Amino acid sequence: MLLETIELPTDEHYARNLIDGRWVFPAAPYEYEIRNPSDSTVTAVVPLSSRFDVGRAISAAGDALSGPWSELHTRDQLLALLLHRLAEAAPELARLQSVETGLGYDDSLAGIESTLRIARAVLTREVLHPRPTPAGVSGHVLSWGAPFSEMLLNVFPALAAGNTVVVKPSLRGPLSPVAVAFIADQLGFPAGVLNIVQGTGVDVGAALISSTALQALHVRANESTVSRASRAGRRTQVPLRTLTGGGNAAIIYPGLGEDKFAPMASEIADGVRVHNAGGPLGLHTVAVHRDVAKKAIAAILGQLTLFKNRAAPLPTEPIRRRAFDRIDQLDADGGRVLLGGTIPDDIRHRMGWRLPTTVVDLGDATSTAAAKALAHSREPLGPVLTVVQWNTLTDLDRVFDARRHCDGYASIWGDDSSDERTRFGVAAREQGPQSAMYSGLVPAAWTGESAHRTTGEMAS
């Protein structure tokens, strides 16, 4: 039976972990303040947990495998009920995600609705075509770009496949994951099926990464964290499934019709606006065919300039500095800053850690400048769009050769062919010009469909 009113967690829940069906304090009494990136106000206080809490959560998840969760009918009913409940609570969840990320409400709500469409497709697939793989305990280390999407798209497929889970939300974006777990708990999910352990990467993250009791480890993080997980996997022998930060792109072909330039520019602007930490719905690279490059770049710049494209802020000054350092590096490697590239000296930007929307033209894909920028550029952060011009499909392969693109998606514009070539290692071919944010296109790694790389492959 559905609850009569929509409830979200209170401060009492945010300050605890969900382990074995109970909201409990961590083993050690340490806390961390969550601040709204837009104005630096404290929005919640969350626990800093330890390996002892992770151990308890993994044990509880293991015990839950043989309970009611192993019954397909029970599991599917609860998961369908969860998606229904999350859809009802979408406006409240959108406001919550806005508070913890600085995303505008409309962008936050659009991301949640897109995420729910993907999750429904995942559940339908599991009901109609259940996979025969045995269930186990699945570990999840999440990032902070779009916390609701991070939580649902990373964790939901594991639950739908019959696994129990232990989730470490991002230290900077834990509120939405806790809200999803709270609603699941209120709906009667069996104890131990969904466990949330909050804390830092060096404590909670490291404990999950080093555990030998997991069936699989899912890491959605920056390249440093993925590298640590890969090294640990050689010892634990736990399969590592990754989605690295910042793999998303748009590809513009010479066949783009005159009437498509405006919607293309608008949807690219949408993707740039929500790209603060490389979230699953963000975008940081456009590869445009040289025949239409001049007009396409002008349309994109016009869209960004006309509507000012108020992007989501970064959560701290050090992270904003990393993003700005990347712009400096792109410029030093031969890129040309077409828009933005400076931090205004005013109180709004200092308190909100905002980075103005920036567009950097890397020139031709075969140029030395583009090769240096693409090979050595730091992790994409912030609303920074790099533009590369291409002429052949070989150029595209060169542009997207970096490991960060192996788990990304592409929004395709102007290509009406039936060629189903795959780019970035997963579904990158889409018929018609629809942005990933609103069409529901998402990296297959989020849904468990891709051929996941082994720890050995990750290390190479």
Image (cartoon, rainbow, N blue to C red):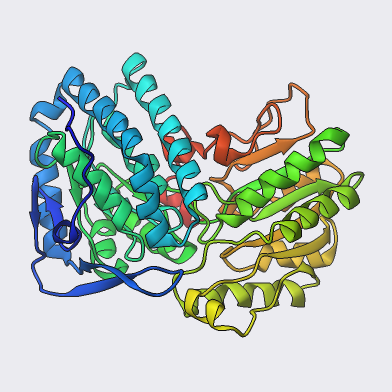
- Residue 35: x and y in percent read 35, 71
| Residue at the image position 68 percent from the left and 63 percent from the top | 375
Which of the image's four quarters has the N terminus?
top left
Q: Please indicate whether residue 460 sits to the left or right of residue 232 in the image.
A: right
Q: In which quadrant of the rendered view does residue 154 lie?
A: top left
Q: Is residue 23 above or below residue 335?
A: above
Residue 231 visible, this angle = no
Q: Nearer the viewer, residue 336 or 393?
A: 336
Q: Please indicate whether residue 152 sits to the left or right of residue 49 in the image.
A: right
Q: In this view, does 51 lie above or below 351?
A: above
User: Count of labels shown?
Assistant: 0
Q: Which of 6 and 149 is in front in this view?
A: 6
| Residue at the image position 9 percent from the left and 40 percent from the top | 191
Q: Which of 4 and 409 is in front in this view?
A: 4
| Residue at the image position 31 percent from the left and 67 percent from the top | 201
Residue furthest front in the image? 5
| Residue at the image position 49 percent from the left and 36 percent from the top | 444
